[in-house]
Image: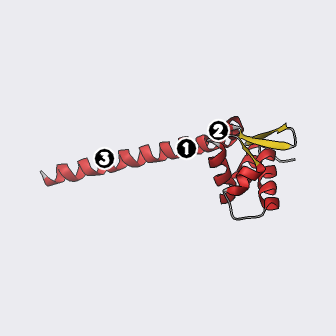
Amino acid sequence: MISAEQGAFRALADPTRRQILMHLSTREMTIAQVCEKFEVTRGAIKKHLVILEEGNLISVRRAGRERINRLHPQGMKSAVDWLQYFSRFWDDKLTNLEIAINSENKSKESHND
C-alpha cells in the first residue's frame, strides 16, 4: 500500500495529470470535457483520472451516467507538508549562506578602509 504523499507525488509526476488538475481547478468536468482539452484517447484520460483519484487529488461523483471530476485540494496537503519540511531545510541553509556572505563582505570592507 502506498502512502498519501506517494500517491500524490505519483499523480503529480506526469505533466498531463498536472494539466488536468489545472483545468479542474477552474470547474468540475466530465471525462468528455477533460478529453476535449487534450489530443489523447479517452482511455488515456480515464487512466490519468484514476491515478489522480487514487492520489486523492480529485474526487468523482456520479450524475446519471456521467462521472463528474472535481479538484480535491485537501489531497495535496500531504505532498505540501512533505515539501515544506525541506523548504525549512533550505531556508536555514540559505540564511546561513546569507550570513556568511554578509560577514565576508564586511571583512573585505574593513580591509579596504
For the residues bearing labels 2 and 1, Cβ distance under 8 angstroms: no
Question: How far apart are the two marked residues, 3 and 2, measured between alpha carbons?
Answer: 31 Å
* Residue underneath mark 2: 81
Question: Is 23 placed left or right of 54 in the picture?
Answer: left
User: Label 2 amino acid?
Assistant: Asp
- Percent position of residue 73, x then y: 67, 37
10 Å crowding of disc 1: few (<14), some (14-19), many (20+) = few
SS label for mark 1: helix
Of callouts 3 and 2, which one flags the residue occurring earlier in the amino acid sequence?
2
Question: How far apart are the two marked residues, 2 and 1, measured between alpha carbons?
Answer: 10 Å
- Percent position of residue 64, x then y: 87, 38
* Residue underneath mark 3: 102
Camera-side residue: 29 or 16?
Answer: 29
Question: Is 85 placed left or right of 4 in the picture?
Answer: left
Question: Is 52 placed left or right of 23 in the picture?
Answer: right
Of callouts 3 and 1, which one flags the residue occurring earlier in the amino acid sequence?
1
Colour mapping: secondary structure
SS label for mark 2: helix
* Residue underneath mark 1: 87
Residue at image position (87%, 43%) is 65
Question: How far apart are the two marked residues, 3 and 1, measured between alpha carbons?
Answer: 22 Å
SS label for mark 3: helix
User: Label 1 amino acid?
Assistant: Ser
- Percent position of residue 90, x then y: 51, 47
User: Label 3 amino acid?
Assistant: Asn
Residue at image position (24%, 47%) is 106
Quarter of the figure with residue 96:
top left
Residue at image position (30%, 47%) is 103
